[in-house]
Image (cartoon, rainbow, N blue to C red):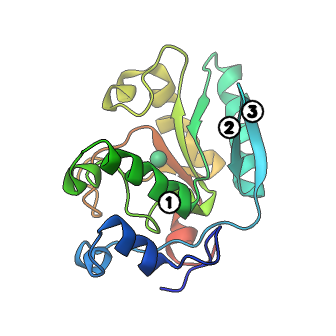
Amino acid sequence: MALPLSNPQTQLPDLLHQLGIPAGEIARRGLRLFNEAQDLVVVETRATRGFLLQPRAAQAWREMQAAAAEDGIVLELVSAFRSIERQAELIRRKLDNGLALADILSVLAIPGTSEHHTGCAIDVTTPGGPPADESFEDTTAFAWLNAHAAQHGYTLSFPRGNPEGYLYEPWHWCFERERLLAGMA
Ligand SMILES: [Zn+2]
């Protein structure tokens, strides 16, 4: 489990220990670990926030966004690359606010197990649409993605009844997911 982290002083087992996540939890849930992407580009900047993706995922996103625009659909990023440390920070903040770890882990992936670490996963919304909410499936943007995302290499990671046991996430799409899961990305 020796993964390279943004802060090389902290290894994943230590990080999980600090958060109170049992060492066997990742195996118990049948989750897999993802390496943090090292090669990232800024794909989009909104307000002061930059969204990072791996270069090929970024290129495919831009092409997909342009193709959607031609069909009158506006696609916007809500989230892209997220470091393992950042994932831990999000969990730490909720713990500090008094939330129970089990409840937190039902909505936030255990650090090390998020597809967002790879720089190939994106959370998508559309203007006026809900960010990271199941009702995104009722938008024309979601219908467009269902019909066209695969042509750009993006697939829905967590449909209803997904084998990982995650909640249905119509907003979360991943570039070349099969390749990623095969450990080739
Ligand atoms: Zn996501």
Residue 126 picture quarter = top right
Side of 56 relative to 10 (left or right): right
Report the front residue among 102 and 97: 97
Write down the residue under mark 2: 64
Q: Residue type at mark 1: give it.
A: Glu
Q: Secondary structure at mark 1?
A: helix
- Residue 45, labelled with which disc? 3
Q: Position of residue 184 (x, y in %)?
A: 61, 78
Q: Where residue 147 is drawn, which disc sits there?
A: none
The label number, if any, that marks residue 115 in the structure image: 1
Looking at the image, tell me whether mark 2 or mark 1 is earlier in sequence order: 2
Residue name at image x 64 percent, y 77 percent? 8
Judge depth for marks 3 and 2 and give the one in front: 3
- For numbered disc 2, what is the local secondary structure? helix
Q: Residue type at mark 2?
A: Met
Quadrant holding the C terminus: bottom right
Residue 52 drawn above or below residue 142: below
Q: Residue 24's image quarter?
A: bottom left
Residue in view at x 58 percent, y 59 percent: 83
